[in-house]
Amino acid sequence: MSEKIEISFDDFKKPEKITIDLPDLIKTGRDTKLKVARLTSRGDRKLSMQYESGLTFPTGIDSGFRMKSSIQLADRFMNRILFNDSFVVLTSATGKVYFVDTESGLISRNLNFEGEVFEKTGVVIENSFYINPVVSIFCIKGDIEKRESATQIYSVTSGYFIWTDLNAIGRNIFFIEYNPQNGIANLVALDSDNGRIICKNEFQTNSSDISDICSFGNMLIFIAGSEILCWSVEQLKFLNLPDLPEVSGDSIIAAGSNQIFIYSANDMIYGSFMPLHFKTTGISRRLINSIGVIGNYFVISKSDGWEIINDAGRVIYRHDDNDVNILQAMNVHIICLSIKNKLVMYNTNNFNEAEGIVLKSDNSDTIPEIISAAMSDTFIFALTKDGTFALITNDKLNINV
């Protein structure tokens, strides 16, 4: 189901057109294809919500978004969508892995990891999927028709659990494992080719609130309880940095190509360039649920709408809403936010233009909640917690009679 959304801008000035300077990545145009390095073409290393996608917002009243296909999976999902050139991979809370064809949106194959639970999101390196149930990491490549295509490359020590999504720099995988009984955690660096442990750096934390790892420059940055921890990729060790902002377990990190932002415990948003030295942006907001970064702008979604702000702290656009808005994905042309079971696409060249797609469930008793969206050069993929998966394209033709 697709619908045009009319938004009143009576209380706001007309939003300015945003020009995002990414000269090495993209040129405007409907058929643009990004030239990106294969190793970084799939995954959100910087927690930025940005996808290296050339998909554009449909132009003119005769075109729009449409749902090309939709499938219902009788399963539960807790993590985000992964995809490569051929398949979307969905990993469920019941230990199933679904391979969805990226062109048709139909199930090609599913594997059953009996007894496993997939809570966190894996990573894609050179078209190979690395997925992580709570106590191990599997690599899936080659012939997906066989269960043997999944090779276990890592298993935690007894008492530990994989506590974060996987991240990657080059061919190396990074994640945090945590033992909730003794409060000891390890930042683990793993060679994706053979599962060799490159290093395992221990740290103590009094809180199980550990954020996902954000890649920024030559550092990995994450939050553990009330601390910001910074780890050097080159030195393979933690760094002691001064003047870090106050944080808590629900703080949020996101980075762009040259700037990183942290939503802190006192509702302030701090930013920093390299070398790392956080300063307040002057922006204070309550009830932020997500931050995305694209170019010199950052997007925040909240319990009552969303905003886009430049790196000088100026609000470029604000949309107020009675419902919770959650930022799910974006590229230089489109910003995707979810409102319960509706995915709303905004045109970054004109925020007056927005279009929504509603994902329906076979269960009429509940409204499904969108948990993840992702963007390729051709499609937007969307998934709800109860297993509705949709393939959305921008080639709808509206015929006016």
Image (cartoon, rainbow, N blue to C red):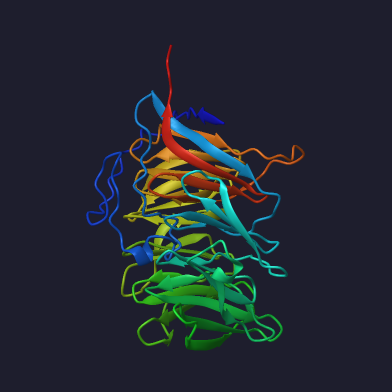
Residue 247 versus residue 120: which sits nearer the camera?
A: 120
Give the residue furthest to the left. 23
Residue 129 versus residue 237: which sits nearer the camera?
A: 129
Question: Could you tell me which residue is drawn at 64 percent across and 73 percent down?
Answer: 134
Question: Could you tell me which residue is drawn at 42 percent across and 65 percent down?
Answer: 46
Q: Quadrant of residue 258?
A: bottom left
Question: Could you tell me which residue is drawn at 51 percent across and 87 percent down?
Answer: 200
Residue 191 versus residue 112: which sits nearer the camera?
A: 112
Of the 4 image quadrants, the one containing the N terminus is: top right
In the rendered structure, the answer to whether residue 318 lies left or right of residue 2 reads left
Q: Quadrant of residue 12?
A: top left
In the rendered structure, the answer to whether residue 222 lies left or right of residue 258 reads right
Q: Position of residue 256 (x, y in %)?
A: 36, 61
Q: Position of residue 264 (x, y in %)?
A: 51, 65
Of the 4 image quadrants, the one containing the C terminus is: top left
Q: Quadrant of residue 231?
A: bottom left
Q: Position of residue 92 (x, y in %)?
A: 65, 59
Above or below — where is 127 with respect to 198? above
Above or below — where is 177 with respect to 394? below
How many marks do you count on the picture? 0
Residue 213 versus residue 62: which sits nearer the camera?
A: 62
In the rendered structure, the answer to whether residue 215 lies left or right of residue 266 reads left
